[in-house]
Image (cartoon, rainbow, N blue to C red):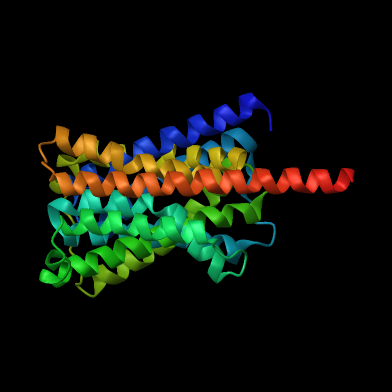
Amino acid sequence: MKKDSLIKGMIFCFLAVVAWGGMFPIAGVIMKVINPFHFTAIRYLVAGIIFLILLFILEGKKSFGFDGKFWKLYFFGSMGFAGYSFLTFGGQKLLGTSGAVVASILMALMPINTVIVNTILGKAKPKPFTLATIIFALAGVIMVITKGNINNLLAVKNNLLGDILIFLGTICWVIYTIGGTSFSSWSPIRYTSLSCALGVITVCLLTAAGTAMHLIKTPSLNDVFSNSWQLGYMALIAGVMAVFLWNYGNKIITPINGILFMNLVPVTTFVISIFLGTSFKGIELCGAVLTISSLIANNAYTRFSINSEKKEKALSQKA
């Protein structure tokens, strides 16, 4: 891999996760008046249309075909855009003011979730060091979620349910990211645009069903317009820009390296939350540092192991 390509991929992933770090505090403001379902539908309807326009401009109508992979793409699109958004933002809403930070911390667990998914799929079994970092990372997450008091986890049933929903949401995004490797012959804009378009179908169907059954309330035009810049950020910056840069960056540096950048999401969220007036206990900050440090240590170990295996293989071939 050329050095300039590597740097470009890293910059793209960095910009994507910084945008996502700001996503949670802003989503918290939106969800005070708009439910996660309609909020997601508005966000990705706008983003989906823009993606398709970009795809047509950049590659023409020839790239609108599915190459016999319609249902596979529909599954990954539904995981990434419907599953992730509904579960993560639904969980954040249940958690209230602490939801933004908890969501960002659990999002940073994606490297660990990737290990779990790959283990379930039979692709690889985690090594002892990785298992140790998983334990430390989870300990840090618990420190953030409970604020140092384990009773906080079970004190309100919405707390535990919210945490579980967000965790399941991050699993959905890991599946979507790994799914991109099944479309290696496609350009990042093609995978992003078509998966988003198909994911929006699921988003709209579930939102319409929930509305028809009176489970969720349709927001008023005043609610939408009063949150216009927040929705604009979610659709254009955290939606179009971040998702495209994320898929493009991961195509260059591969998901195992791209996922590492998720560690920056809680950092951005903490900074923005503090700017918006949220205060944190020392135990929460310590938990965040422990989680991020564990994830970085695991990635460094993984890189070292891969490089060592390559060297051993090269030496054995020479022999």
| Residue 296 rendering spot, x and y as whole percentages | 44, 44
Quarter of the image containing the N terminus?
Answer: top right
- From the viewer's side, name the closer residue of 46 and 139: 139
| Residue 215 rendering spot, x and y as whole percentages | 20, 72
Q: Residue at x 49, y 64 (%)?
A: 116
- Can you name the residue that lies furthest to the front here? 319
- Can you name the residue that lies furthest to the right here? 319
Residue 168 visible in rendering: yes
Q: Looking at the image, is 38 positioned above or below residue 222? A: below
Q: Is residue 298 left or right of residue 235?
A: right
Residue 185 visible in rendering: no
- Can you name the residue that lies furthest to the top here? 4
Q: Looking at the image, is 267 positioned above or below residue 74? A: above
- From the viewer's side, name the closer residue of 78 and 177: 177
Q: Looking at the image, is 14 positioned above or below residue 131? A: above
Q: Is residue 147 left or right of residue 190?
A: left
Q: Is residue 125 left or right of residue 34?
A: right
> Where, by quadrant of the figure, is residue 243 drawn?
top left
Q: Residue at x 29, y 67 (%)?
A: 164
Q: Residue at x 41, y 44 (%)?
A: 262
| Residue 132 rendering spot, x and y as whole percentages | 43, 59
| Residue 182 rendering spot, x and y as whole percentages | 64, 56
Q: Residue at x 74, y 43 (%)?
A: 311
